[in-house]
């Protein structure tokens, strides 16, 4: 099929993630490829925009708790899909940036992620799949997710 050795799979815990991981397992089955799962916690601190955009301290979230919850969810996802010996990465940031940076830092040769195929405003704002696709040093497999 292919010579992929280091496959990164973006997981967002939606129902679509089941489709994405299924395709990733198909890609890695015939080859001795390493699978790594990545989940990006997209957290923006609250901003008070009533008068001017300033950071507000009236509402705080423990970022470590967000990461711990995501790690726990990723572990459950791995158990559900019988993914043994997969590295699991959780980071805070924007998915486009964090996925791209991870791939560059770890010499992945394929990234697999879901694409919802948004139109209109969703397309103008950009999607994770589209953002990753255009800044990639490796192949990208975007799995079409049906709404």
Image (cartoon, helix red, strand yellow):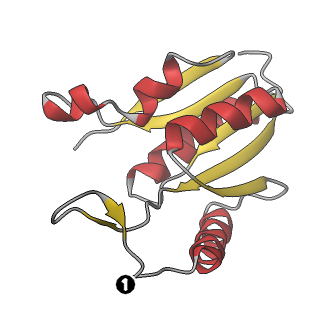
Residue 41 or 33: which is nearer the viewer?
41
Q: Locate residue 142, reporting x and y percent.
A: 47, 27
Residue 52 or 136: which is nearer the viewer?
52
> Residue at 60% of width from left, 65% of height from top?
77
Image quadrant of residue 47? bottom left
Image quadrant of residue 137? top right
Classify 10 Å Cα crowding around label 1: few (below 14), some (14-19), many (20 and above). Answer: few
Residue 131 falls left or right of residue 31: left
Vertical placement of residue 139 versus 110, above or below:
above
- For the image shown, how many numbered marks are present on the structure? 1
Residue behind mark 1: 58
| Residue 68 shows in the view | yes
Where disc 1 sits, the SS reads loop
| Residue 25 shows in the view | no
Q: Locate residue 31, reporting x and y percent.
A: 81, 28
Image quadrant of residue 23? top right
> Residue at 49% of width from left, 80% of height from top?
61
Residue 49 or 147: which is nearer the viewer?
49
Instruction: State the quadrant of the N terminus.
Output: top right
Residue 112 falls left or right of residue 30: left
Q: Locate residue 7, reporting x and y percent.
A: 73, 33
Vertical placement of residue 98 versus 4, above or below:
below
Q: Locate residue 87, reporting x and y percent.
A: 80, 53
Instruction: State the quadrant of the C terminus.
Output: top left
> Residue at 28% of width from left, 57% of height from top?
53
> Residue at 85% of width from left, 56% of height from top?
85
């Amino acid at each position: 099929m292919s010579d992929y050795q280091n496959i990164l799979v973006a997981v967002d815990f939606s129902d679509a993630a089941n489709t994405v991981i299924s395709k990733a397992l198909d890609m890695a089955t015939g080859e001795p490829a390493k699978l790594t799962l990545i989940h990006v916690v997209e957290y923006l601190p609250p901003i008070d925009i009533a008068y001017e955009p300033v950071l507000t301290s009236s509402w705080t979230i423990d970022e470590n708790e967000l990461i711990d919850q995501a790690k726990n969810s990723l572990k459950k996802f791995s158990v559900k899909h019988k993914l043994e010996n997969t590295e699991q990465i959780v980071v805070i940031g924007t998915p486009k940036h964090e996925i791209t940076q991870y791939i560059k830092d770890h010499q992945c040769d394929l990234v697999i992620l879901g694409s919802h195929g948004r139109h209109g405003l969703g397309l103008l704002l950009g999607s994770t799949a589209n953002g990753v696709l255009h800044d990639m040093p490796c192949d990208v497999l975007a799995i079409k997710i049906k709404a």
